[in-house]
Structures are given as structure tokens and as C-alpha cells.
Amino acid sequence: MPFGVFMEKAKYSLENNDFSLWPKAMDNENSTDAGWFLYSTRAQDKEYLSALLSKVIGENIGVKWKPIRASFNTGKKKDRLVEEKIKALHVECVIDRLQEVRGKLSIWYSSSSYWFPDGTKMRLVPTITAVTSMSNKTKFASCVACQAALNAGLASALTREISTNLLLDCKDPSTNKSFREVMMEITPEDKPNTTLFHTIDKQFKSDTIINFQFHPEHASEANNLIAGLVPFLKDNGHSFHLIMFSPEALQ
């Protein structure tokens, strides 16, 4: 095969992830996966989440969106294709801090956790290599299925009324709450024990757009609220966060 043709095929395969090559989230050769987040989404701000969780648990970690390894490596193409279809945010840390990182993250993201650092409900699931018993393997498969359903089923909407999304986590001095915190505390009218929005994050490569994700059953309520953010903030005592909005939106 001519060298030029080989390079073109290699370039195509790499661009389309045919080789399953995924750059590490951490700049450390001795890093490994500590687990993956059930209920995580691709729209979440990975850099923000990496910095937030590193601060919360006091460990240097990275977060990366990539396929869940759902079986031991058999080398079969069929297994690789199945794994690459289901993706989640993975947590990476240095190998010698693996157990400590898992333990600290489990405090915030275990099955009994009800409060989450950025308001997004997630559960830390161990990697397939850490699953030994048959009952845990069954639970692992159930988690993978739930993640696949979430990836396929979430609805989303965005607002273009923002002049800068860099103030998304700027806290109101009077309430000590950020715009993200205010919005993530909102509950649906018919389900007071859950949150209206699943995630709220900056749009990738945008300094103005904020992306909201929510379950389709709450689409009408969520879209109405997003369309009326300015009056909502005014009426509920959160006028400080209006500094994020454009003059046109405020008028």
C-alpha cells in the first residue's frame, strides 16, 4: 500500500475513533480510571467539573467523556463496537491515589447521596476490572443500560439572552448562591423530590450560551422557565444574576 494512502486511512480512523484511542484527562503517565459517572452527559463542562471535584475532595483528578468498558478485553471487534456506543464521564487519577480518590468521591456520589457539588445527580460506578462478584456484575450491567437510556432520552434547550456565561458560578453576595445553584434548586410542580434540570453548563466553545438538560416529561415546564429567565430572577429576589444578560434581554 502506498505510504500516502496508508496515512490517509490512518488519519480517517483516528478522527472517527476507529482505534479507540482516547487522550488522558490528566497530564500524568501514571494515571488510571477511578470509575465513571452514571447519569453523566456529554454536555457537562469537563474542565469545570475536574476543577470542582479536585477542590472538593482535595485530590488532583481529571474528567473525560469516553466509552464505558463493559467487558474484559477479548480482542473481538463486536465487543469493541458495543462498548464504544455507550459513553460516560470517567474520573482519572494517579495510580497510587486510586483507593483514596474512590473513597472520597463515594462520599458525594454513592447510592445514598442526595446532595451533589454542582447540583447534578450522578453515581460513581467502579470500572469493570474492579467488579468481581456475579451480583455486582449484574448491577454493573444495569448501570450501563441506565446510562445508555439517559444518553438517548434527555432533552435540552439553550438561551441566547446571555452576554457572558463566565459568570455562571459567580455568587450573589447577599444569598451566597450562583446562577447555577439557583436554577438547580428548582423542582418540577408534580415531582418536588427531584430537580427540574439535570445539568446546566456553558455551551462548548461558547462564551455566551448556556445549555440546559432535562427529562422530556418536564420539557414544557423547563422551556417556559428558560424563555422567562429575566422575570423569574426578578420576581424571586435574584436580580444580582441579571448582570449575565444582554441589554436586549433586560429590555
Image (tube, grey):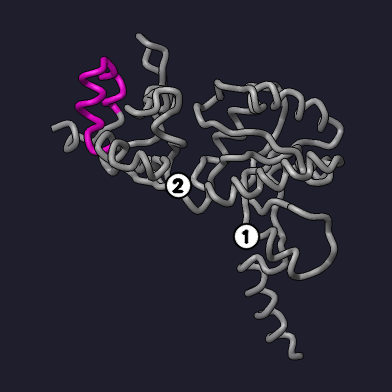
Q: Secondary structure at mark 1?
A: helix
Outermost residue on the top side: it is: 174
Q: Nearer the viewer, residue 84 or 241?
A: 84
Q: Earlier in the sequence, mark 1 or mark 2?
A: 1
Examine the residues drawn in magenta and state their main secondary structure.
helix
Which label sits on residue 136? none
* SS at mark 2 in the image: loop
Q: Quadrant of the N terminus?
A: bottom right
Q: Position of residue 218 (x, y in %)?
A: 35, 39
**Amino acid bearing label 2:** Leu
Task: Report crowding for label 2: few under 14, some 14 to 19, many 20 or more residues within 10 A (C-alpha).
Answer: some
Question: In the shown orientation, is residue 163 left or right of residue 144?
Answer: left
Q: Is residue 241 magenta?
A: yes
Q: Is residue 70 above or below residue 80?
A: above
Q: Residue furthest bottom?
A: 1
Query: Does the residue at mark 1 contact the one at mark 2 (Cβ under 8 Å)?
Result: no
In this view, the residue in front, 104 or 7, is 104
Q: Amino acid at mark 1?
A: Lys
Observer able to see residue 225 = yes
Q: Which residue position is annotated with label 1? A: 85
Q: Quick check: 58 left or right of 116?
A: right
Queried whether the magenta region covers residue 139, the answer comes back as no
Residue 205 in the image, given as x and y percentages of width and height: 45, 49
For the point 54% across and 50% down, which residue is it?
149
Q: Pointer 2: what residue? A: 154
Q: What residue is shown at x 26% (from left), y 15% (from top)?
A: 237
Q: Which residues are magenta?
A: 226-243
Q: Quadrant of residue 60?
A: top right
Percent x, y of residue 230: 22, 29
Q: Which of the 4 image quadrants contains residue 91?
A: top right
Q: Which quadrant of the figure contains the C terminus?
A: top left
